[in-house]
Image (tube, rainbow, N blue to C red):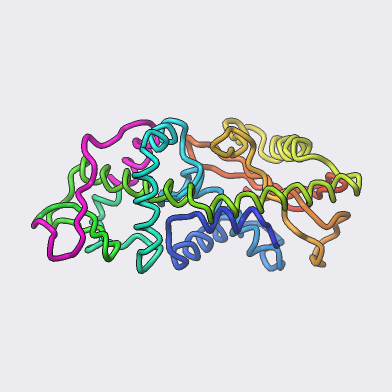
């Protein structure tokens, strides 16, 4: 599979395919400036990977299913197995995987939603849980609630309060967590770990470098290229604290020279100004194949 980790990350996003494509195009625009590789076949995979990692890291403000902060993880783990299973079964029966709303957020609500997503990650939780009803005809007028039969968030005509937006954010995290705990997600993670192990063994057999070495090479390259602009940029990490590094299959790439069939894709991010640096490292000889800021 091309960039096996990319699929796992992208599949866990709580957004539609259309939104994924929009985010990818956004990342492509960021990466195109001054990069001579924008027309290579690897470009779409790199843009996809960048989109996935920036989403899960909160650089772009869309809801995602994975890689929550420890304080949110602790909250999710506090729910009973019965409640998690109930939400899991409900989500599995939804007509669509995408969150649907009875109306669009206003511009002001969008801005507040963005800020409240970050606040939620930092531990600001709603005082109450979102109301739920079975059918649309059961929705109380002017109330934020979730319609279980259709998977629709019913929003009032008036602008929502911070509490109401937080209740929606909280329930989105609950649904995501419930799916992540399901058998399909656990099986996918197990398969991904096996695939990682197989490719790491292949790289090792070829005398290649480790992920840790690739990170250091990428860091030095970034510091050499950016100078002072490299300050504050850190490797993106998974929720368990390990470095988030994607392995890409580049065996069929002919647009540039490479020694190995795999490459490490390393992304650094400055959380304060959201500046990003990307570096692709040949997994065999450690040479720098592509970089972009």
Residue at x 80%, y 39% (from the top left corner): 210
Is 30 above or below relative to 269?
below
Q: Is residue 119 magenta?
A: yes
Side of 155 relative to 4 (left or right): left
Whether residue 67 sits left or right of residue 280 in the image: it is: left
Residue name at image x 47 percent, y 66 percent: 17
Instruction: Answer whether residue 108 is magenta in the image.
Output: no
Residue at image location 35% in from the left, 37% down from the top:
120
Number of numbered markers? 0
Compared to residue 241, the image places residue 147 above or below, namely below
Horizontal placement of 283 versus 183: left or right? right
Asked whether, in this view, residue 227 is left or right of residue 57, the answer is right
Q: Position of residue 51 (x, y in %)?
A: 54, 54
Instruction: Point out residue 145 in the picture as x, y percentages from the top left corner.
Output: 20, 53
Q: Is residue 44 above or below residue 211?
A: below
Q: Residue at x 60, y 34 (%)?
A: 234
Which quadrant of the view contains residue 260?
A: bottom right
Question: Where are the magenta residues, as a range?
Answer: 112-140
**Residue 193, placed above or below residue 120:** below
Question: Looking at this view, is 226 or 279 the one in front?
Answer: 279
Judging depth in this view, the residue of 51 and 131 nearest the camera is 131
Residue 211 percent across, percent down from the top left: 75, 40
In the picture, which quadrant includes the N terminus? bottom right
User: Outermost residue toward the front?
Assistant: 82
Outermost left residue: 141
């Amino acid at each position: 599979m091309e960039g096996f980790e990319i699929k796992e990350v992208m599949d866990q996003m709580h957004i539609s395919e259309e939104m994924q494509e929009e985010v990818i195009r956004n990342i492509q625009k960021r990466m195109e400036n001054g990069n001579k590789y924008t027309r290579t076949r690897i470009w779409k995979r790199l843009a996809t990977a960048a989109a996935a990692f920036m989403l899960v890291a909160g650089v772009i403000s869309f809801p995602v299913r994975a890689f929550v902060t420890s304080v949110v993880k602790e909250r999710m783990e506090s729910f009973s197995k019965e409640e998690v299973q109930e939400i899991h079964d409900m989500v599995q029966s939804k007509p669509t995987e995408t969150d649907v709303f009875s109306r669009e957020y206003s511009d002001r609500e969008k801005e507040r939603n963005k800020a409240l997503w970050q606040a939620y990650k930092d531990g600001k939780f709603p005082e109450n849980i979102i109301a739920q009803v079975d059918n649309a005809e059961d929705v109380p007028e002017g109330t934020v609630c979730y319609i279980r039969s259709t998977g629709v968030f019913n929003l009032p005509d008036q602008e929502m309060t911070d509490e109401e937006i937080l209740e929606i954010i909280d329930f989105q995290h609950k649904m995501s967590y419930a799916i992540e705990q399901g058998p399909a997600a656990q099986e996918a993670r197990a398969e991904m770990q096996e695939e990682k192990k197989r490719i790491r063994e292949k790289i090792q057999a070829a005398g290649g470098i480790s992920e840790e070495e690739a990170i250091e090479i990428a860091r030095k390259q970034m510091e050499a290229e950016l100078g002072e602009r490299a300050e504050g940029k850190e490797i993106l990490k998974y929720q368990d604290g390990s470095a988030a590094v994607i392995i890409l299959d580049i065996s069929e790439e002919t647009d540039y020279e490479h020694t190995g069939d795999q490459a490490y894709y390393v992304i650094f991010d400055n959380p304060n100004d959201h500046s990003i640096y990307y570096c692709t490292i040949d997994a065999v000889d450690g040479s720098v194949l592509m970089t972009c800021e």
